[in-house]
Structure formats: structure tokens, C-alpha cells
Amino acid sequence: MRKVLKWIGIVVGGLIVVIVVAVLGLSIAGNAKLHKTREVPSDTVAIPTDEASLARGKQIVTGVCSGCHGPDLAGIPMIDDPSIGTIYAANLTVLSQTWSDADYVRAIRHAVAPDGRQLPIMPAEAWIHLSAEDLGSIIAYLKTLPPTGAESPEPMLTLMGRVLLATGQFGQIFPAEYIDHSTPFPDMPPIGANVAYGEYIAEFCKACHGENLNGMQPQGDPTSPPAPNLSPGGELVGWTEDGFLQTFRTGVTPAGRELNNEYMPWKEFGSFSDDELRGVWMYLQTLPALPSGNDQPS
């Protein structure tokens, strides 16, 4: 009997050692991934100074950036869980104190920090499709912001968070790993109610709604609800153009569902004009009717 218990103890002890070694190995791998660096092309962008360009930059920053970086652009937590760790969106108001124009281009277009680290949850898969003119306008506007608060904390993951990162549970949290960094700047489409411009703006929707805009689990935060299907195979099939516009003006869908601005920043996206939103609507109508992703309701 004692021999049996002894062997059971040896086996259990061995398993514990194997588990501990595996967890430590995954933790090291996750930490390495969190601090991985990457070389990317050096893109040159002209930074304008005229009022029209600054206004355009402000419009895009308000409509797209403030959803993650906060209404004052001083940075907010994207992940804040004691068991996992914290990842903050950057405080955009203090960057001009230390960043060069090239640093802004690298971070926005390639999701790579000035020191070469890959930036988590920075949707460069959308920003890399931004025109050089618009990117220049955004940088010009960001450089005019008065500093508010301190720099956002560096990403910090717990043991569990590092293990989850190593095993891919955060999804494609580092866009720099999978985007095509050689993508050329696109031509700037005419601003307004046209399909080309709608497609251009809808690139920003793909970070949450998926490459085909038929909905997905947003990257980086497994606790957030799946983004809905924007193709004609989803809820929008019963909407009208006016209903689409009113959703961004009121935060209430034609079906009466209130949008949660934390997950769908309708207030910020509503900074685009009616004609610009009509362009997005026109583009969405050209998509094939796709089933909703992630087992979410249509």
C-alpha cells in the first residue's frame, strides 16, 4: 500500500512540475510577445498647417480615435482586469512633446511605437488604408493639442494574462503582425455621398465588425460583446438610409435598440456629416448578404 501511495505521490508531483514548467514557459513566451519589436517602412507624409486640413484632422480624430483614446484623447483603459492586467490606449495629447512626425506615421499606419515595439489593439489594419493627405491632417491636428495628464501606463499583464496572450486567447491583438506594411497610400476619394468614400470610411469599422463587416468578436477584449453584422445579411437589411443616419444622431436603432457608446461609439462617429454617412450607407448596400459571425444574432 505504501508503495502505491509513493508512486501516486511521484506521479502527482511530476505532473505538478510539468504544469508549473509549462505555465512558466507560456508566461515567458507571452512576455516576449508583449515586448516584441518590428522594423517597418519609413513612410514620408507632408504635414499641413492650413485651417481646412486641421479641421479635417479634428473631424477624423473625433470620429474615430476618441472611441478608444477617450473624449479628451488622454487615454483610457482598453483592458482593465485584475486577473489579466491592463492595456491603456495612449494619451494622444502628450505625444508631441517627444514624438517626431515619423513616429506618428509609424504608430498610426503600422501600429509600431517609436522604440519599435508592436502596439496592442491599435487598428492599423484600417489606418494603413488612409490617404497620405488625411494622415497628414490627423498628425497636424494632434500636434496642436494641449497636454492633458500624464503618459498612459505601459501594458502590464499578469501571469494569467501572459499565458492567455501566448496561447492566442486575445486574438490578433497586434495588427503589426499581420498587416501588409508595404501597402501604398490610396488615392483620396471625393468626400461625400458616394460609394468610394463610404468604402474608405468603412475601413475603420472593420476593426470591430470584421474584414467582411459581417460581425466578429472585437480583438483584444474577450469580454466585449460581438460587433453586429453590417452586411445585408444582418439587422441593417430592414433599415432605411434615414434610419441609418438617425442611429448616429440619436444612438437608437430603427428597431428601438439603444447603442452602448462604450462598444459602438456612435456619438463620436456621428461627427461625420450626413453626406459622409450616406456614403457609408451606400457602400454597405453593395456588400453581399453574409451570415453573422461568432454565432451572434442577425
Image (tube, rainbow, N blue to C red):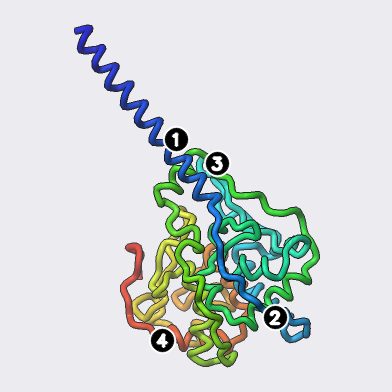
How many residues crowd mark 2 within 10 Å: few (<14), some (14–19), many (20+)? few
User: Residue 92: x, y in percent?
Assistant: 70, 63
Residue shown at 24%/12% (left/top)? 5
Outermost top residue: 2
How many residues crowd mark 4 within 10 Å: few (<14), some (14–19), many (20+)? some
Q: Is residue 101 visible?
A: yes
Q: Amino acid at mark 3?
A: Pro
The residue wearing badge 1 is 24
Q: Which mark is first along the chain, 3 or 1?
A: 1
Q: Quadrant of residue 20?
A: top left
In front: mark 3 or mark 2? 2
User: Residue 166: x, y in percent?
Assistant: 43, 47
The residue wearing badge 3 is 82
Q: Which mark is first along the chain, 2 or 3?
A: 2
Q: CA distance from mark 4 to mark 1?
A: 49 Å
Q: Which mark is first along the chain, 4 or 2?
A: 2
Q: CA distance from mark 4 to mark 3?
A: 42 Å
Q: Amino acid at mark 1?
A: Leu
The residue wearing badge 4 is 285
Q: Amino acid at mark 4?
A: Gln
User: Residue 264: x, y in percent?
Assistant: 53, 67
The residue wearing badge 2 is 46
